[in-house]
Amino acid sequence: MLHLDMDAFFAAVEQLTRPTLADRPVLVGGAGPRGVVAGASYQARVFGARSAMPMGQARRRCPHATVLPPRFPLYKAISDEVMGVLAEFSPVLEPVSVDEAFIEPPVLAGASPETVREFGTRLRAAVRERTGLPASVGAGSGKQIAKIASELAKPDGLRVVAHADQDDVLGPLPVRSLWGIGPVSGEALRRIGIETVGQLAAMDGREVTGVLGSAMGTELHRLARGIDDRPVAPRGAAKQISAETTFDTDLTAMSAVHTAVESICVAVHRRLVADGRAARTVTVKARTGDFVTHTRSETTPFPSRDLATLVAVARRLTDTAVGEGGVRLLGVSVSGFGDEPPLALFDAVPSAQGWRAAPAEPAVAGVPGTGSPAAVSPGAGDPGAELRGHAGAPVAVEEHVIPPATAEERPDPPADDADRPWRAGDDATHPEHGHGWVQGAGHGRVTVRFETALTGPGRTRTLDATDPQLTRADPLRSWRPAD
């Protein structure tokens, strides 16, 4: 089996499409006081910045890093290209997240390490040729070995672990390197003197199950000894789609809470439409400033993907989920997927008397695309249905849940939104200077560096922020020009 992992994917995409940043530290994520790092370049990691770290902490560790908002539509497009390459090399493909996947090419069954190494070299070259990005590849007898091998190969490398070398590779690694061993189980093993995979492998199986439990202990003991017979298989369909927002300051007015819920519903709805299904269950999550979380759910009589229905249910649930004090986080999820209902069933909202037909007009205040069902575009794009998952999570899962989209992951306002001010990291285009990205704005001026993946490092120009020739641009054009 082979495991391919795109190196520092989000940051690498930014460095590729904004060549001036190629050798500089880059942090991708929310820049607000509660922002979190979604991706860090290797140049930033040298200073201790990491993914999932609070942005404030990362900026203190690496104050000279360039901080950029995520561009998930671009990441998704490049991810699709990578998965397309993998599919060409192997009919058996299992995506793990937006930037990594397992493959099990039949041509490598029983192959020598040299043959596998040549295959991996061609695979990495094909990914770089198609996307312009580096990738690390690991190969071994099972998923665990292949995943560890790709980690050892980083950055931009290839590592093939022959069966005869498994014990030598696994033995010195910390037990936390194995899937399924987290802080609690790792501490339980440490207390009995087990800190490496080799030490865990040498334990008696009954002792392992006594510490970690029967099911978990048996599986981890097998993995520590290099036994991993889990097949590579396509992921199942998502059983939940969700989006959530952590606010820079707590929301204290219900009007602000309702506006936020409506905005989150738009993100969920777009992903639901892109997934091509309808949902029966709506769940709202509200977290107060003192970190108390309340959830409320409701299951409708029939599946729907109507935005007005989703907003109506979510707002009503929010009224009961929000407790005392300000609201720090809001989330909306949909589940209980079913076949798309007839159009006549789309127009329904809950009322005190039960479900009733929803009026075609007016639209929900502040929410684009509401009103009549015709206002919902069936071709709406997917702003991030396949987002990056937890790299340490077990691959063998029974339920596929699309991870929550955060505030930064939701798509930017439409390109013609003239009221929205320019922010650092925005894509822009000018008929004379071409495609570029905003480096800074204020006092009626905006500074744009005009460059793309194809142009190499470009020049900066400071323009009037209201210049009609400077317009918002599709992030994909920073990677590939328009057809």
Image: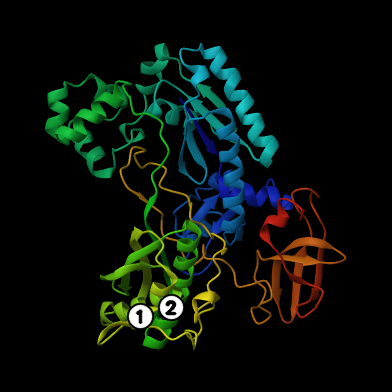
On the picture, is 199 further left or further right than 363? left
Q: Residues within 10 Å of mark 2 (few under 14, many from 20)?
A: many
Q: Which residue in the protein does label 2 denote? A: 308
Q: Which mark is residue 445?
A: none
Q: Position of residue 119 (x, y in %)?
A: 59, 21
The residue beneath circle 1 is 349
Callout 1–callout 2 Cβ contact below 8 Å? yes
Of helix, strand and loop, which one carries label 2? helix
Residue 74 locus on image (x, y percent): 62, 54
Answer left or right for 432 relative to 473: right
Q: Which comes sooner in the sequence, label 1 or label 2? A: 2
Q: Nearer the viewer, residue 90 or 357?
A: 357
Question: Which percent across, then down, holds residue 446?
Answer: 74, 73
Name which residue type carries label 1: Val
Residue at 57% in and 51% down: 76
Image point (85%, 63%), residue name? 433
Would you say residue 21 is visible in this rendering?
Answer: no
Figure coloring: rainbow
* Dot 2 amino acid type: Ala
Q: What residue is rendered at 67% in x and 74% in y?
A: 422
